[in-house]
Amino acid sequence: MLTGRNQGRGRMRWLVALLLLLAVAGTSAWLLWHDDEGTPARRSGVPQAHDSAGAARCSPPNLTGVGGRRSAAAWRKVIDPVHRAACAGDFTALARLLGGGRPTHFLTEECTGCTSADIVTMWRDEYGFDPASLARLLETSPVVDQGGLTYERGDTVAVFARGTSRLPAEWSAFFVRCHEDNMCAMLAPSPSGAP
């Protein structure tokens, strides 16, 4: 027959075993959802930046020539998220921002049938894209025209379309190597490849 003391020890063992099991399960779950550096892992297939791009210090994006405060505020809502993602080296956020979430209408180097994640992966793997270079590009003075804003720095070009009454303004094009693409040559305000 069990005494009260033995029952107490049995309950204590069960409690310790349960706490140990919960600790192991919690640690396992944390490891599954975080990468080697302790930051949340991204499962979208979009590459993550682990180099200097993630630690870039950025100035605000340049909106010189966009008009009054109201116009600048409207453009800031479109450009700031792209600039922040580029400055942080956040490939996932950049992929989400392509073409207002519709990558099929986003102009870039040829990538037939690509998803947003495929496009960003192509920029990184095939063209050596560093997101900090996009942040620096957006810190240069844009060319403002009826179609929107075009940023050009060296051979890199980013275009933000002004939108219409039905469609909002959006990040509509980005070329890592403008000189290699005929469409970019038409969009770029000056000859591509100029340093």
Image (cartoon, rainbow, N blue to C red):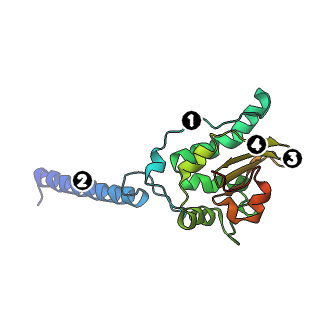
Which of 193 and 117 lies nearest the eye of the viewer?
193
Q: Which residue is mark 3?
A: 164
Q: Which of the two discs, 4 and 3, labels the residue nearer the N terminus?
A: 4
In front: mark 1 or mark 4?
A: 4
Callout 3 amino acid: Thr
Which of 77 and 178 lies nearest the eye of the viewer?
178
Q: Which residue is mark 1?
A: 59
Please tell me how crowded label 1 is: few (under 14), some (14-19), or many (20+) other residues with Cα within 10 Å. Answer: few
Q: Name which quarter of the figure residue 35 lies in.
A: bottom left
Q: Is residue 3 shown left or right of residue 20?
A: left
Callout 4 amino acid: Val
Q: Which of the two discs, 1 and 4, labels the residue nearer the N terminus?
A: 1
Mark-to-mark CA distance, 4 and 3: 19 Å
Mark-to-mark CA distance, 1 and 4: 19 Å
Query: What residue is at 27 percent from the left and 53 percent from the top?
Result: 19
Element class at badge 1: loop
Mark-to-mark CA distance, 4 and 2: 68 Å
Residue 174 placed where, x, y %?
A: 68, 56
Q: Residue furthest bottom?
A: 112
Query: What residue is at 17 percent from the left and 56 percent from the top?
Result: 10
Q: Which residue is mark 4?
A: 143
Callout 2 amino acid: Leu
| Position of 194 relative to 146 (above/below) | below
Mark-to-mark CA distance, 1 and 3: 29 Å
